[in-house]
Image: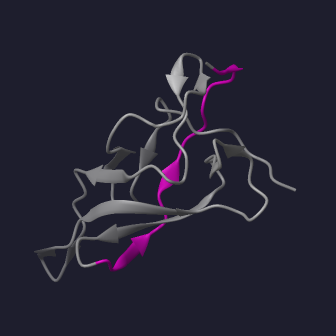
Amino acid sequence: MLSGNLVNSGSAIGCPHGGQVAPASAPSSGVRIDGLPVPTATDVFTVSGCRHMIDRVPHPCVTVRWTPDRDSVLIDGAPVLLHSTSALCFSAALVPQGPPVVGTAPRGVSSR
């Protein structure tokens, strides 16, 4: 059974090194929470401001890939994101850098 709060455009998401995670473009779904669009696992997420270093060489997180459960709730065929959805941040060389930190989203679901 799935449980967790839905992620929306106002949810605080960060990489494990302090960078900010956000959808690269406006989420494609018409579903909103408290007036904010709800992204899905098919949306592209980018990371800005990651200061991860290895041996004093920058290796910042640049993207996030979500791995939703098989029985996820769908919006237009795409899995929604919960604060508990599995994900990993990746460097530009596609090296896994650790899971993002996801804050909870406000309540109040609506659709267009």
Determine the image quadrant of residue 33.
top right
Query: What colour scheme has been applied to the protein in the rendered image?
Result: one colour
Please state the horizontal and vertical placement of residue 23, each as a whole percent of the image: 38, 43
Please state the horizontal and vertical placement of residue 4, each as a whole percent of the image: 73, 45
| Residue that sits furthest to the right in the current view | 1
Q: Is residue 110 magenta?
A: yes
Magenta residue span: 94-111
Position of 84 relative to 91 (above/below): above
Determine the image quadrant of residue 30.
top right
Q: Examine the residues drawn in magenta and state their main secondary structure.
A: loop
| Residue that sits furthest to the front in the current view | 76
- The residue depicted at 69 percent of the width and 39 percent of the height is 5
- The residue depicted at 47 percent of the width and 32 percent of the height is 9
Could you tell me which quadrant the C terminus lies in? Answer: top right
Position of 61 relative to 10 (above/below): below
Please state the horizontal and vertical placement of residue 37, each as a whole percent of the image: 51, 28
Query: Image check: 24 left or right of 72?
Result: left
| Residue that sits furthest to the left in the current view | 57
- The residue depicted at 47 percent of the width and 29 percent of the height is 10
- The residue depicted at 25 percent of the width and 67 percent of the height is 52
Query: Image check: 63 left or right of 5?
Result: left
The residue nearer to you, when weighing 25 against 51, is: 25
Position of 78 relative to 97 (above/below): above
Could you tell me which quadrant the N terminus lies in? Answer: bottom right
Please state the horizontal and vertical placement of residue 39, each as a whole percent of the image: 51, 40
Query: Image check: 9 left or right of 2?
Result: left
Position of 112 relative to 49 (above/below): above
Q: How many marks?
A: 0
Q: Is residue 72 magenta?
A: no
